[in-house]
Image (cartoon, grey):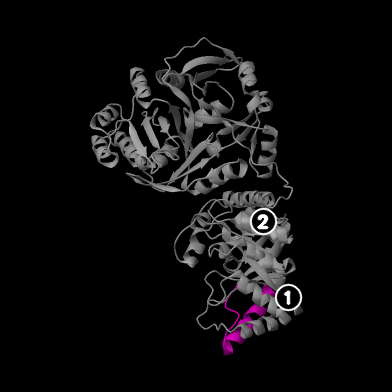
């Protein structure tokens, strides 16, 4: 697969964009005309930079308002495109994007449009140029790739073909199956873009909210699958208009783009039964352990909190200052080593969640897939790296990969058993983990999980925080064995943003454990000295009216700061929160009754409001 990206997709000057695109590993680049016009370098100088970077110039774009123009405007259009042919020759490319006309002067008579393209084909052929006709979703007369293909067929000129853009087709809900009517030999170029499902003007949607394949809600993989069935073998290129991408890290966006192309091609191959080049996305069996980095002093403050929550210290690493705490099927690891990764993480971030251990069918296959997606393996040369390989994850944390069948053996070989006892609080397993990330990396980390693992995104939610709005999106395995929520906010004072400031970067902010009896667990935590997050009385007064819960039951919930939600099917979600450990991370206890699918989003503003009060009070 040849990969390409339009320069409009990333930030910086044209020279900076090209450097980042080459560094990310693309084969080719589309030159977006405004980037060239605003550049001090000549087209020939840009062509030399492209060649020196090992890229090719796959396309020059866009040319606007050509077909169907009356009188002098028609002649001016032909004169303009001849000048573009000159620029293309200097850039070293023979393909140009011509998008369907949006001018109010354009006439929609099909015969006139066909004649215009016939004349253009002769001029293009004389210059060795291929014209890719693209149906803009908001085109004045042509706004559907089926219309564009009908015109290209009627013109029947070797220099005139069709250019397909997934956004223009999918934003109008044009069936992917309609691509089967197109002759693959007439496909000049293919551009890909995803987007969240939004109800707004098509042009505004396109210009501000496009994203990489897999970061949005459009069926881009199905679009690519139809092209592969046709036998299309040309480049897959990204054309992304996104305000955040244009203002964000050039290198990060370029890297995400290439990752998205690799992943969407793999998805498309699987959809049509082609033999994929990559191992399958890894099915996560669950979170086997969560690791905390801490100094001796920090661990001395953290461990009483774990003990108060009913965890018992059941193991100590045979050669390191690392302890294993367990309850139910939950394993927490406290790493107090004075060298190595966890020590470095603690120096930078303070006591923090530094790693997740995930069970997968084949760590080796997952590593191969990660390598193809340019997800970096962590290897410090220690013996542990071979026993339990790790990948770089959110905020520089690690994701350890463990073969499910080898878990017991690894625990037994790495840790010696301790006769630790705890006052079990009824916690069963890890329900989910939640990460706070910079708002500019919100889509990036979603792509990380969905490209590498067999998980799916849930609907994005906007959660009100007293200091702003928090974007939140859950990513889950189909069986619920793995759940992670990604949270980001542009408001500096939100809990999500404060966390990033407090720990000097993105990371995991809270862990949720399950219980079978939320009331018994709440009492056990209180008896263990664990401070629970106080919930205001107004919340409980409202529960009676909303859910018809009996006054005495609400009184008990109030006494233990228990929150509650019920979905339309009658499934229930009960939850309590601990106070944060040194303003760094906190714990949630949940009880799911029935098949409750969410995370108590209705209660999130209550929880955030309660947490913000401690900030205001300086606690």
Looking at the image, residue 40 sits to the left or right of residue 503; the answer is right
Q: Is residue 112 magenta?
A: no
Q: Secondary structure at mark 1?
A: loop
Mark 2 to mark 1: distance in Å? 26 Å
Q: Which mark is residue 292?
A: none
Q: Position of residue 341 (x, y in %)?
A: 58, 28
* Residue positioned 50% across, 19% down in the render: 325
Q: Which residue is mark 1?
A: 159
Q: Nearer the viewer, residue 345 or 159?
A: 159
Q: Position of residue 334 (x, y in %)?
A: 51, 22
* Residue positioned 66% across, 40% down in the render: 370
Depth check, mark 2 against mark 1: the one in front is 2
Q: Main secondary structure of the magenta part?
A: helix
Q: Which residue is mark 2?
A: 225
Q: Which residues are magenta?
A: 63-87
Q: How many marks?
A: 2
Q: Is residue 429 above or below residue 105?
A: above
């Amino acid at each position: 697969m040849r990969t390409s990206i339009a320069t409009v997709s990333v930030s910086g000057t044209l020279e900076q964009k090209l450097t980042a695109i080459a560094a990310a590993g693309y084969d080719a680049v589309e030159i977006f005309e405004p980037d060239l016009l605003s550049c001090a370098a000549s087209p020939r100088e840009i062509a030399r930079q492209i060649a020196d970077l090992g890229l090719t110039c796959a396309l020059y774009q866009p040319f606007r308002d050509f077909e169907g123009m009356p009188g002098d405007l028609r002649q001016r259009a032909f004169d303009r495109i001849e000048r573009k042919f000159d620029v293309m020759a200097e850039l070293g490319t023979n393909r140009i994007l011509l998008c369907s006309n949006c001018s109010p002067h354009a006439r929609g008579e099909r015969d006139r449009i066909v004649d215009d393209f016939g004349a253009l084909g002769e001029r293009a052929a004389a210059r060795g140029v291929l014209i890719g006709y693209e149906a803009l979703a908001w085109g004045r007369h042509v706004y559907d790739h089926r219309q564009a293909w009908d015109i290209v067929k009627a013109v029947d000129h070797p220099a005139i073909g069709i250019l397909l853009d997934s956004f223009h087709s999918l934003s109008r809900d044009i069936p992917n199956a309609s691509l089967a009517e197109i002759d693959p030999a007439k496909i000049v170029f293919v551009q890909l873009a995803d987007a969240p499902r939004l109800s707004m003007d098509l042009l505004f949607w396109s210009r501000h909210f496009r994203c990489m394949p897999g970061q949005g809600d459009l069926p881009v993989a199905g679009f690519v699958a139809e092209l592969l069935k046709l036998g299309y073998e040309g480049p897959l290129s990204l054309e992304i208009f996104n305000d955040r991408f244009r203002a964000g890290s050039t290198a990060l966006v370029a890297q995400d783009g290439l990752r998205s192309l690799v992943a969407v091609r793999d998805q498309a191959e699987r959809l049509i039964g082609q033999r994929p080049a990559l191992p399958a996305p890894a099915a996560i069996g669950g979170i086997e352990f969560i690791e905390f980095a801490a100094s001796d002093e920090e661990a001395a403050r953290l461990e009483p909190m774990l003990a108060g929550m009913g965890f018992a210290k059941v193991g100590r690493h045979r050669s390191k200052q690392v302890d294993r705490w367990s309850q139910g099927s939950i394993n927490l690891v406290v790493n107090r080593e004075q060298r190595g990764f966890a020590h470095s993480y603690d120096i930078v971030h303070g006591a923090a969640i530094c790693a997740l251990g995930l069970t997968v069918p084949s760590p080796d296959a997952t590593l191969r897939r990660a390598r193809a997606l340019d997800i970096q393996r962590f290897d410090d040369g220690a013996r542990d790296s071979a026993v339990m390989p790790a990948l770089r994850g959110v905020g520089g944390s690690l994701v350890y990969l463990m073969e499910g069948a080898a878990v017991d053996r690894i625990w037994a070989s790495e840790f010696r058993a301790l006769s630790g006892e705890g006052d079990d609080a009824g916690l069963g397993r890890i329900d989910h983990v939640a990460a706070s990330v910079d708002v500019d990396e919100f889509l990036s980390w979603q792509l990380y999980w969905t490209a590498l693992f067999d998980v799916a995104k849930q609907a994005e939610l906007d959660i009100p925080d007293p200091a702003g709005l928090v974007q939140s999106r859950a990513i889950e395995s189909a069986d619920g064995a793995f759940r992670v929520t990604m949270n980001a906010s542009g408001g500096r004072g939100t809990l999500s943003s404060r966390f990033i400031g407090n720990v000097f970067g993105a990371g995991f902010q809270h862990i949720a454990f399950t219980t079978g009896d939320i009331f018994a667990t709440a009492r056990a935590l209180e008896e263990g000295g664990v401070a629970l997050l106080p919930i205001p009385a107004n919340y409980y007064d409202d529960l009676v009216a909303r859910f018809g819960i009996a006054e005495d039951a609400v009184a008990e919930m109030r006494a233990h700061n228990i929150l509650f939600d019920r979905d339309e099917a009658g499934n229930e979600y009960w939850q309590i929160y601990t106070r944060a450990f040194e303003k760094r991370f906190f714990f949630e206890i949940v009880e799911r009754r029935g098949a409750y699918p969410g995370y108590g989003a209705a209660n999130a503003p209550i929880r955030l409001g309660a947490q913000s009060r401690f900030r205001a009070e300086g606690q």
